[in-house]
Image (tube, rainbow, N blue to C red):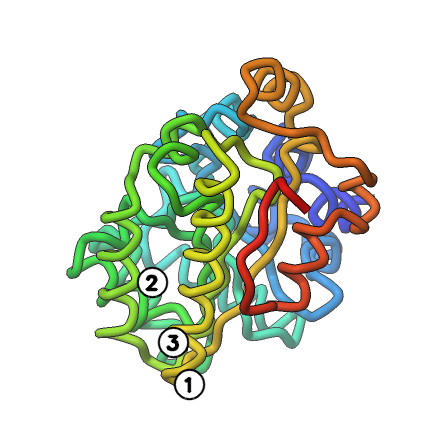
């Protein structure tokens, strides 16, 4: 069903059938479909568009999604009315804008401000490429009570191999901006646990930095969550490519089962360095 699509695969719910359902919802033509777009924790999911503004990360398939802008041809007032009507019908006032990099326009700011004043809370996905800009970070912390940052790694070697389009210095700048404008937000960062590294020391440095970001924010009483992605699961071809180059050591235990040491250490938030050497 459509709820499973939303929960299990973003690349599915931006395809044609779900998008047509979203279009009908926003034009109020199919009120019975509303229930399909609520997560179990009662968050309404609405994509503004499906394309990432970067779209060049080597492990990612979101960039192949079709260009979709379900707000095309609608005024800010029409979008506000449609979202507000959806919230009332579902008795849910938390809305997730499912763009990979949410960006601001005057029209979007008007939508956010109007609905926030009515009691709606917003969730979105952002990224270092935008958060390193202080003005953008200020808006993100102002309008979104929860936002996710696709970090994946924290050393320049690994970031370059993934073609993330930013550096460790950019990451530091982004989180300095978040700390400056923090407004009781919850911030999530994603980590790819089996990414490439040029040495054991480089791998250790990568994970130490990722954990340090979390500890730093928590020490300031900022709400911080991290999530784990697995390259071997997301892109087996790339995993094998990096392994052939010697940038990845295949784990002795099954990384997908959560028994791999890196996964265990990250889940426990241990304050010790770790890497390939077990």
Q: Which residue is mark 2?
A: 111
Q: Looking at the image, is mark 3 or mark 1 earlier in the sequence?
A: 3
**Mark-to-mark CA distance, 2 and 3:** 8 Å
The structure residue drawn at horizontal position 58% and vertical position 52%, both measured from the top left corner, is 274
Q: Residue at x 50, y 48 (%)?
A: 204
Return the x and y of residue 44 as percentages of the image width and height.
60, 62
Q: Which residue is mark 3?
A: 116
Nearest-to-viewer mark from 2 and 1: 1
SS category of the residue bearing label 3: helix
Judge the density around disc 2: few (<14), some (14-19), many (≥20) Cα neighbours within 10 Å. Answer: some
**Count of marks overlaid on the render:** 3
Residue 180 relative to residue 140: left or right: left
- Between 18 and 151, the residue placed more toward the observer is 151
- Residue nearest the viewer, comparing 212 with 41: 212
Which residue is depicted at the point 60% across and 68% down? Answer: 270
Figure quadrant of the N terminus? top right
Judging by the rendered image, the residue that carries numbered circle 1 is: 221
**Quadrant of the image occupied by residue 187:** bottom left
Residue 32 in the figure: left or right of residue 184: right
Q: Secondary structure at mark 2?
A: helix
Above or below residue 175? Residue 91 is below
């Amino acid at each position: 069903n459509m709820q499973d699509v939303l929960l299990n695969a973003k690349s599915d719910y931006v395809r044609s059938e779900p998008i047509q359902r979203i279009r009908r919802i926003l034009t109020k033509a199919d009120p019975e479909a509303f229930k399909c777009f609520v997560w179990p924790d009662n968050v309404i999911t609405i994509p503004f568009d499906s394309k990432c503004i970067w779209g060049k990360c080597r492990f990612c398939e979101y960039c192949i999604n079709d260009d979709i802008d379900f707000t095309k041809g609608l005024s800010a007032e029409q979008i506000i009315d449609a979202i507000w009507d959806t919230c009332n019908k579902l008795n849910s006032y938390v809305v997730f804008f499912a763009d990979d990099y949410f960006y601001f326009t005057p029209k979007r700011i008007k939508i956010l401000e109007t609905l926030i004043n009515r009691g709606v809370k917003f969730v979105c996905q952002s990224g270092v490429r935008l958060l390193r800009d202080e003005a953008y970070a200020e808006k993100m912390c102002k309008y979104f009570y929860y936002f996710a940052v696709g970090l994946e790694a924290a050393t320049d070697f690994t970031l370059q191999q993934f073609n993330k389009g930013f550096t460790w210095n950019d990451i530091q700048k982004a989180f300095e901006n978040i700390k400056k404008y923090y407004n009781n937000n919850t911030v999530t960062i994603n980590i790819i646990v089996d990414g490439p590294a040029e040495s054991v020391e480089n791998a250790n440095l990568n994970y130490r930095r990722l954990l340090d970001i979390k500890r730093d924010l928590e020490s300031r009483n900022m709400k911080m969550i991290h999530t784990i992605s697995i390259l071997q699961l997301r892109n087996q071809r790339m995993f094998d490519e990096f392994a052939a180059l010697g940038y990845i050591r295949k784990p002795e235990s099954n990384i997908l089962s959560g028994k791999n040491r890196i996964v265990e250490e990250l889940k426990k938030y241990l304050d010790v360095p770790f890497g390939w050497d077990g």
